[in-house]
């Protein structure tokens, strides 16, 4: 059996006083899995994603991704971790409006210091693969929501990360574009890409996840994967 | 509290950084403005202001103590036209020796004659002295000296070995008399103790008159006073008008550069206030949209945002006035030294006018974006949010992305193009800072060169004076008259000194100078001629034009002489004395400010036919040592040889002009202030930019931008502006310097050598051009740090 790519042990997160966002949560995700994290607003989905992405640190417990203990990294090491080991897709795309599609896609490679030629070749390959090569010189504002999310996906895959984190990737899309992105994620997973998908859209989870967990009040209330194992 | 009040309070409270920056910027701008305006006002007739403040004496009269009793002198206070009088004070002219001191003066050196006045206290209806440090001399063994003129400090001692009991006085205070009524003050009892046996001190009376604006009026006043005492018993009387003329010349030298700094400071302050306030209001557009959606009227929105800007601005303004007044103490102190006047203070109306203008500027600059925001459709205001209008600078960003630069650098370089107006204002602020530093540095370098040039009139490593320094005219005496030489023994014969110097091992070359007074055909009165003997080829003054003396029959004169006589290089002037004449040809124009430039330098042989005697006490030898000679050992050895003659040689340590030091200090302070204001302008702009781009920063950090890359990007976003602003500011600063220096020279009555003005060489220009980048980087460091530390998750949530 493959070693877990994400290993979360007894993670709690408290913001100020009151109910914890995560309460002693433990979770393992194996390479090649596409895990959907379901839950209502405030259930701790985004907090969990932030812990894995190294955007936030747990109050207690540990987060290990691809063998790296994320919660103990310095800011500089976290930046390197995000460049090399994860790709992120956001609900509102988070593309930089002043950069062309190609420049947006190139960014992670450029920040990682990948040689220009190599980076450009990879960007061209991804744009082609995702069907947006014709928009390479366009600015994101001129694209449809679905196309923008494709650009975001291309950007997230630029440095060939072992883990793709998707936060409500279809939340801001119309149904046709959402279906388009759903298909894209399924295809990616079929190529072996590990995906952690945070959503409250059960249809999305059902169509592209190999397993789902549901969070309630910062705890795993249901783990369909575990039941299937 | 009303809804509007709550909005204002919340706006000020929540945006703490912006509120703090606005408070600080307003404070710095108001501080700079108070100082600049204070200096500008103080530069207008500083002598008149200080003279009025000290109730300076229009006429300082001295009466023969053997012929005029104290009561008779005091009675002159009732002469018609006298509005106030002080005295009689007993006066002596004595030559003290240097005693133990911390000021580096050689103990035992004899000083020029000094006018010492016995005065019980520094105040009074006339000549109300400013005691600038220490205390007044009230007991025996104490003396007070004029501030700024004497090389002595408090605690130093003066000896009077020629007087019975060899009295010794300790300097206990420094005082400033705009009317220069004395060169030292002691208690009346001490003055009695200093009086040589058989001598009677003269009596000094100080007067103010109803009418004293012109020489004629002062002349009439003087005649009225003289008529009140026995004929011929008034031995001297000095009009304040001569001092006023000299002081006006000194202050006029300062006015051009103080004005340049003042105007720069004021303009920059208003600019920075405009940038800060309009930026702050613009940044709140989205919040304004939300308020309008809740039912706020456009007028309420405008009031809320103008008030929101005025609260921190008012705090900053109050602090700025306080700091401006506090900083004015040292700054105006330098100006006082420079102007040679009494205490200068910031005029009270400036403390009211500057805050009023500053707050009006804040309200005005806040009103424009607030009105624009008030007129915005609610939905637009919400949608526009805080992000720059999309589309701006895209082409530049695209092109920069193609350059072989690290991505954070190319992203940073493109940032200013998203907000061209804001970037232009920031560039202007940095450019002003660069203009200030270029101008200030150039001024310091030029003044240093001019100081060095002026020092070249005594070029030797060792100087021997036949009788110490020539005595300056005593207060109240006509400087063009014969010099006062009371109670001094005859000077040593120059030939005897020359023989000792020639015989001294280590002597390389030397020459002597001596002063004579001759007439110049076509000009009234006499003029000082400095006669050179020996090998003076190496003793050249710094030349403005032409060449140094190369033999008899030639003359070198300062610019002031050429201007006053209407002569030019190549002209021949005729010197006359004792009914004889000697023509000399002007071969050079030298840098020299003595006697307002009315000096002629020539070979002593040029004067041979005139039989004009060289004043013995003015003879001075300048000695150049052989290479490898130890100056200290040479000095010790020469002094041993000169001991039988009763004179000493001194190392030529050069002279540091108090005016130059004051100008340097003033320029340095003003430059620093301009830099601080420019830096704060940048800080504020980068804070605004960083806040606006916090979401983009979050995205970049989520994609793996490291803290160092974030700092690099933010710094690069201003470094390019800084460099461009420098490229613009440095030439403007140079041009300002090149314009102001000649004006200062003109005010001082001279032209400056071109080499003293052309001070901007490549080694100076490179750091100056980089200076703008440094200002910008310094201003951006703090927000860059914030950007690097910003929590990515929170930044990503910021839409």
Image (tube, coloured by chain):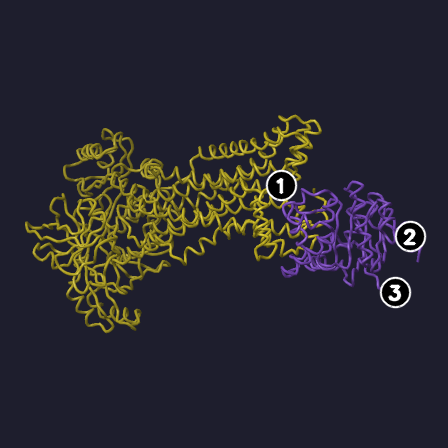
Chain colours: A purple, B yellow
Q: Mark 3 points at which residue?
A: A1
Q: Between A81 and B462, which is closer to the camera in this rendering?
A: A81
Q: Indicate the secondary structure of the residue bearing disc 1.
A: loop
Disc 3, SS? loop
Q: Where is residue A173 in the image (x, y as percent from the top left)?
A: 77, 42
Q: Quadrant of the C terminus of chain B?
A: top right
Mark 1 and mark 3 in contact (Cβ < 8 Å)?
no
The answer for which chain carries disc 1 is: B
Is the C-beta separation of discs 1 and 2 under 8 Å? no
Position of residue B431 measured from the top left corner of the image (x, y, whole percent):
47, 46
Disc 2 sits on a residue from what chain?
A: A
A96 and B144: which is toward the camera: A96
Q: How crowded is mark 2: few (under 14 residues within 10 Å), some or many (20 or more)?
A: some
Which residue: 31% across, 69% down? B632
x then y, percent, for residue B202? 22, 44
Q: In this view, does B463 lie to the left or right of A87?
A: left
Q: Name the residue under label 1.
A: B390
Q: Say what secondary structure mark 2 lies in.
A: helix
The residue singled out by tag 2 in the image is: A224
Residue B529, disc: none
Q: Do labels 2 and 3 share a chain?
A: yes
Q: In this view, does A117 lie to the left or right of B160?
A: right
Q: Earlier in the sequence, mark 2 or mark 3?
A: 3
Q: Residues within 10 Å of mark 1 (few under 14, many from 20)?
A: few
Name the chain under label 3: A
C-alpha gap between disc 2 and disc 3: 19 Å
């Amino acid at each position: 059996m493959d070693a877990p790519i994400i290993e979360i042990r007894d993670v709690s997160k408290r913001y100020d006083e009151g109910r914890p966002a995560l309460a002693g949560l433990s979770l393992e995700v194996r390479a090649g899995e596409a895990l959907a994290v379901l839950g209502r607003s405030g259930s701790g989905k985004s907090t969990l994603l932030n812990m894995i992405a190294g955007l936030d640190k747990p109050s207690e417990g540990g987060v290990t991704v691809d063998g790296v203990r994320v919660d103990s990294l310095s800011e500089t090491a976290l930046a390197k971790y995000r460049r090399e080991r994860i790709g992120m897709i956001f609900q509102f795309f988070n593309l930089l409006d002043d950069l062309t599609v190609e420049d947006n896609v190139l960014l992670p490679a450029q920040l990682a210091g990948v040689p220009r030629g190599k980076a450009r070749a990879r960007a061209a390959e991804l744009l082609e693969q995702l069907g947006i090569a014709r928009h390479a010189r366009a600015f994101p504002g001129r694209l449809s929501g679905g196309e923008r999310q494709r650009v975001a996906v291309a950007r997230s895959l630029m440095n060939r990360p072992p883990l793709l984190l998707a936060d409500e990737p279809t939340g801001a899309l119309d149904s046709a574009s959402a279906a388009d992105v759903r298909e894209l994620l399924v295809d990616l997973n079929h190529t072996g890409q590990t995906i952690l998908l945070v959503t409250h859209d059960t249809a999305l989870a059902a169509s592209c996840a190999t397993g789902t967990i549901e969070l309630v009040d910062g705890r795993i209330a249901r783990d369909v994967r575990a039941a299937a194992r | 509290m009303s809804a509007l009040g709550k909005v204002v309070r919340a706006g000020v409270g929540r945006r703490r950084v912006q509120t703090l920056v606005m408070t600080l910027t307003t404070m710095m701008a108001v501080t700079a403005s108070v100082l600049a305006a204070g200096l500008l006002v103080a530069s207008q007739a500083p002598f008149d202001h200080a003279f009025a403040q000290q109730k300076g004496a229009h006429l300082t009269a001295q009466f023969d103590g053997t012929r005029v009793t104290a009561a008779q002198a005091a009675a002159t206070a009732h002469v018609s036209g006298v509005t106030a009088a002080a005295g009689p004070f007993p006066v002596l002219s004595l030559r003290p020796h240097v005693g133990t001191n911390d000021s580096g003066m050689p103990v035992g050196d004899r000083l020029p004659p000094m006018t010492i006045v016995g005065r019980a206290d520094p105040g009074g209806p006339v000549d109300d002295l400013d005691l600038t440090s220490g205390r007044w001399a009230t007991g025996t063994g104490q003396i007070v000296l004029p501030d700024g003129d004497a090389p002595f400090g408090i605690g130093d001692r003066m000896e009077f070995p020629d007087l019975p009991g060899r009295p010794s006085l300790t300097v206990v205070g420094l005082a400033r008399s705009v009317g220069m009524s004395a060169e030292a003050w002691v208690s009346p009892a001490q003055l009695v103790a200093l009086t040589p046996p058989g001598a009677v001190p003269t009596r000094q009376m100080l007067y103010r008159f109803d009418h004293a604006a012109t020489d004629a009026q002062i002349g009439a006043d003087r005649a009225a006073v003289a008529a009140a005492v026995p004929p011929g018993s008034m031995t001297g009387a000095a009009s304040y008008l001569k001092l006023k003329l000299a002081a006006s010349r000194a202050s006029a030298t300062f006015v051009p550069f103080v004005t340049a700094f003042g105007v720069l400071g004021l303009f920059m302050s208003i600019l920075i206030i405009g940038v800060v306030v309009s930026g702050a209001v613009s940044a709140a557009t989205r919040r304004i949209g939300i308020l309008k959606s809740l039912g706020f009227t456009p007028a309420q929105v405008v009031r809320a945002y103008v008030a929101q800007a005025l609260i921190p601005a008012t705090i900053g303004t109050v602090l700025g006035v306080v700091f401006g007044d506090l900083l004015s103490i040292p700054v105006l102190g330098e100006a006082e030294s420079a102007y040679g006047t009494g205490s200068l203070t910031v005029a009270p109306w400036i403390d009211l006018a500057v805050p009023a203008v500053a707050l009006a500027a804040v309200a005005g600059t806040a009103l424009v974006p607030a009105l624009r925001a008030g007129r915005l459709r609610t939905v637009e205001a919400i949608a526009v949010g805080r992000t720059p209008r999309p589309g701006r600078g895209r082409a530049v960003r695209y092109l920069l992305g193609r350059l072989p630069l690290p991505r954070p650098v190319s992203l940073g370089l493109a940032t200013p193009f998203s907000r061209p107006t804001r970037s232009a204002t920031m560039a202007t602020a940095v450019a002003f800072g660069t203009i200030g530093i270029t101008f200030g540095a150039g001024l310091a370098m030029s003044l240093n060169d001019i100081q060095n040039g002026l020092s070249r009139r005594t070029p030797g490593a060792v100087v021997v004076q036949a009788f110490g320094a020539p005595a300056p005219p005593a207060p109240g005496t006509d400087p063009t008259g014969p010099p006062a030489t009371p109670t001094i023994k005859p000077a040593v014969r120059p030939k005897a000194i020359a023989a000792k110097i020639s015989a001294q091992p280590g002597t390389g070359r030397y020459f002597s100078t001596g002063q004579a007074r001759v007439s110049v055909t076509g000009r009234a009165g006499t003029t000082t001629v400095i006669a050179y003997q020996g090998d003076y080829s190496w003793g050249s003054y710094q030349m403005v034009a032409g060449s140094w003396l190369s033999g008899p029959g030639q003359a070198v004169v300062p610019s002031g002489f050429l201007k006053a006589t209407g002569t030019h290089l190549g002209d021949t002037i005729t010197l006359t004395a004792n009914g004889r004449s000697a023509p000399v040809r002007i071969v050079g124009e030298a840098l020299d400010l003595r006697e307002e430039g009315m000096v002629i330098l020539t070979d002593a042989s040029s004067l041979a036919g005139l039989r004009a005697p060289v004043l013995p006490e003015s003879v001075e030898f300048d000695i150049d040592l052989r290479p490898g000679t130890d100056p200290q050992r040479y000095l010790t050895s020469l002094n041993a040889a000169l001991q039988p003659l009763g004179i000493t040689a001194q190392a030529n340590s050069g002279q540091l002009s108090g005016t130059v030091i004051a100008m340097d200090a003033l320029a340095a302070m003003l430059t620093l202030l301009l830099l601080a204001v420019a830096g704060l302008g940048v800080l504020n702009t980068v804070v605004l930019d960083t806040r606006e781009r916090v979401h983009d920063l979050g995205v970049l950090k989520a994609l793996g931008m490291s803290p160092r890359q974030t700092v690099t990007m933010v710094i690069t976003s201003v470094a390019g502006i800084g460099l461009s602003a420098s490229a613009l500011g440095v030439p403007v600063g140079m041009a300002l310097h090149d314009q102001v220096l000649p004006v200062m020279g003109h005010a001082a009555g001279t032209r400056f050598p071109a080499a003293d003005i052309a001070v901007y060489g490549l080694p100076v220009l490179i750091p100056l051009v980089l200076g703008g980048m440094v200002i910008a980087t310094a201003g951006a460091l703090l927000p860059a740090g914030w950007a690097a530390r910003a929590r990515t998750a929170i930044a990503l949530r910021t839409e």
